[in-house]
Image: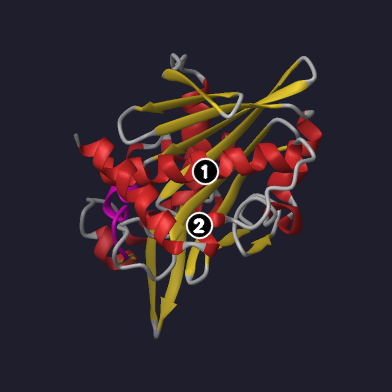
Amino acid sequence: METALKAIAEPTRRRILELVADGELTAGDISRHFDVTRPAISQHLTVLKRAGLLEERRHGARRLYRAHRAGFAAVALFVEGLRDDGPGQVMRTGGSHSTVATERLCLRREMAVEAPPPVVWSLLTDAEQATTWMGTRAVFDLHPGGVYQVEVVPGEVARGEFVAIDPTDRLAFTWGWEGDPVRPVPPGQTIVVFDLTPIEAATLVRVTHRDLPDVVNAGSHSAGWGHYLERLAMAAEGRDPGPDPWVTDPDLRTRDLGASITRSVR
């Protein structure tokens, strides 16, 4: 965090990140935007790479640079932690409280789970346990920058990188869909944060999904996290969630997501 904040404190480096936010550029392409020497630009690129804010890819003899979105996620979480966002609308679902809030392409859901935080944490971070409540297959490399990958339903894979790992407290990872031309949410585009707060013998589980591109995606992802939070609660409380009905009955999933999208755009 300290390295990243120092890196973006310098105006030239902030401008470089703006240039490569949505595409790749060579060092030569970048240097043409500044009245400084090429070696000076190379030094700035090195600082940004070391801070985890810039990716470098070789293409033949060229080196291409683009912003590393997962690197920004940690900075964004730090800044968001300084804010005091109020709660959204509270509903009661299946005996637990569920909160839904949509704010600037950001959604939040909360649910009280009758289990201690370590139990919930294991269900979030152990790939085998995670698939008892969400997905048919999961690959977790549990360290900052490690792979987060879940085949949510057959043929639809969510992928990202772990950003923050604070055991039994907070888990954050980037999120997007592999090879899906319909959803405009590519891997690494959005950030998912799970916050666990102990409340007596239970845990308040809050999932926040940031940086969604539009209300349609916010609505469908809100419905998705609501569906899976209920299954997470069942698994944490020692109840068998059973087979995911969205896997066994794809038409049900289509109807549920379609209904949520309709509500979102009204």
- Labels 2 & 1 near each other (Cβ < 8 A): yes
Q: Secondary structure at mark 1?
A: helix
The N terminus, quarter of image: top right
Q: Position of residue 8 (x, y in %)?
A: 42, 38
Q: Is 111 positioned to the left or the right of 18 in the image?
A: right
Q: Which residue position is annotated with label 1?
A: 227
Compare residues 207 and 112 and report the one nearer the observer. 112
Which quadrant of the structure image shows residue 85?
Answer: top left
Task: Please indicate, yes or no, whether residue 67 appears anywhere in the rendered image.
Answer: no
Amino acid type of the residue that numbered disc 2 sits on in the rendered structure: Trp
Which residue is the extreme one toward the bottom?
60
Q: Which residue position is annotated with label 2?
A: 246
Q: Position of residue 195 (x, y in %)?
A: 62, 30
Tag 1 or tag 2, which sits nearer the N-term? 1
Compare residues 149 and 81 and report the one nearer the observer. 149
Residue at horizontal 75 percent and vertical 38 percent from the top: 236
Which quadrant of the structure image shows residue 64?
Answer: bottom left
Residue range corresponding to the magenta coloring: 15-24
